[in-house]
Amino acid sequence: MELQANVTALAYLVAAVLFILALRGLSSPETSRAGNTMGMVGMAIAVATTVLSPEIESYTWILVAVVAGGAIGLIIASRIAMTAMPQLVAAFHSLVGLAAVLVAGAAYSHPASFGLLGSAGDIYVASRVEMSLGAMIGAITFSGSIIAFTKLQGLVSGRPITFVGQHWLNALLGLLALALVVYFCFDQSPWVFWSLVALAFVLGFLLIIPIGGADMPVVVSMLNSYSGWAAAGIGFTLHNNALIVTGALVGSSGAILSYIMCKAMNRSFFSVILGGFGGDSSAAAAGGEVDDRPVKQGSADDAAFIMKNAGSVIIVPGYGMAVAQAQHALREMGDELKKAGVKVSYAIHPVAGRMPGHMNVLLAEANVSYDEVFELEDINSEFSQADVAFVIGANDVTNPAAKTDPASPIFGMPILDVERAKTVLFVKRGMAAGYAGVQNELFFNDNTMMLFGDAKKMVESILRAID
């Protein structure tokens, strides 16, 4: 038995090291593939070690769950489009949260089956704290992720949904949830535990609905952090070191990423945690109306002529590029421009797309050289020297209203200064506002030429014209 325990501890340690190396690898596009591989190997070791534990008496339901879950995962992975990856991530976060709630509920109902000290109705205080915190964070993660999924999927509006006194209500519910955690340490009645779970479900819903679509990547990162802390809390309940380490890594890395993104967007980190920083809903709704002011409209031939005769072109990809799957055609266009002696660069905004790194992944998929891809802080000063800024589906992250309109829900968010380029070519299907529901003033600038149409078809037409 002692040998078995030592082998288990060693296997979990190896898995933990691989998880840390995986996070290190995922910090850069060049090493992300190796990072993914190490993460998968680490998870395989952790799962195999847990399943082979001598404490397991029957594998029937484990095999059923593995087969069912594996089949569902395989089907989803084979069919999911890259554009739907953000909502898939949000959906997966919800499952992690729900799993934490279910495990906590099972441990509360049958403590002996989970090796907890005490008996049903008299569980030791330390275990009550662990399971109540895990259940609370898991419930918040579940309902919050469901709302994020519906916003990302377009089932509900991406605009902030706010009401008077919302922050005070969130704060009150948060304090009440913590009070129930404390009270659960003294009274183990079922109504206390399940009231805490129900309250946490409501709180998760209220925390996410006021956050606007332009800030959704931060939400995805934040929910990732929540799911990690939920897993860590349940890991303590189950006395499972692998779950504790994995949850802590996910929770801390997600929190750090959320903080970095908030800092890059000039947002308050605590505002994200407390729920809602997208401005007021009336401003967003007003901004969502289609503007009938005239714009300068061009063709693929016009764009090809302008870019082929330019000295430098900065390409700004956004979610519209992802929807049209235009990244491969965009890379071919960039290659042709480079053959013509044009300097080509790619500018990435921290929240371009619907999750952190969304545009980086798409460009890497199209084999765009990492040396040509720059983050906002590294390339923003270059727009004033650029002959052309080619914006393909990036709306909110290029909107000057973030700098000029205090009433805008995106005010204060740093943007890519594309309007400073000599010419701005903006590829878009129509004049509709961006995901945050705000009209882009850039459309009406004298140096902006609108290229209306499907992003992929437009880039392919430009490519033919360049050739």
Image: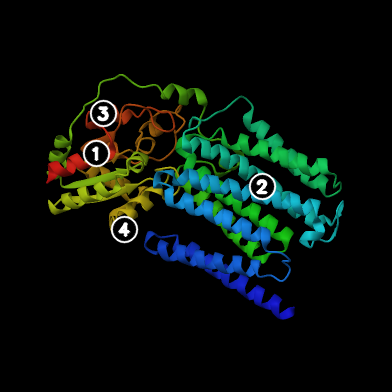
In this picture, is 67 found above or below 208? below
Q: Quadrant of residue 428?
A: top left
Distance (Cα) linking label 1 and label 3: 25 Å
Sequence-wise first label, 3 or 4: 4
Question: Label 2 belongs to which residue?
Answer: 137
Classed neighbour count for the residue bearing mark 1: other residues with Cα under 10 Å, few (<14), some (14–19), many (≥20): some
The label nearer to you, 2 versus 1, is: 1
Q: Residue at x 42, y 24 (%)?
A: 287
Which one is in front in this view, the residue at disc 2 or the one at disc 3? Answer: 2
Task: Tell me residue 229's x, y (percent).
Answer: 63, 53
User: Distance between the Cα atoms at labels 4 and 1?
Assistant: 25 Å
Q: What is the tally of numbered marks visible in this picture?
A: 4
Q: Secondary structure at mark 2?
A: helix
Residue type at the position of mark 1: Lys
Label whose residue precedes the other's in the sequence (2 or 1): 2
For disc 2, the neighbor class at 10 Å (few under 14, some 14 to 19, many from 20) is many
Closer to the chain start, of discs 1 and 3, is: 3
The secondary structure type at the circle numbered 4 is: helix
Residue type (three-letter) at the residue carrying disc 4: Tyr
Does residue 110 appear to the left or right of 46 in the view shown? Answer: right
Q: Are marks 4 and 2 in contact (CB under 8 Å)?
A: no
> Is any atom of residue 260 visible in this view?
yes
Q: Which residue is mark 1?
A: 457
Query: What residue sits right under mark 3 in the picture?
Result: 445
The x, y position of residue 326, in whole percent, is 29, 44
Furthest-bottom residue in view? Answer: 3
Distance, label 4 to label 2, CA atoms, is 37 Å
Q: Quadrant of the N terminus?
A: bottom right
| Residue at mark 4 | 370
3D distance between C-alphas at marks 3 and 4: 31 Å
Q: Amino acid at mark 3?
A: Asn
Asked if residue 262 shows in the view, the reply is no
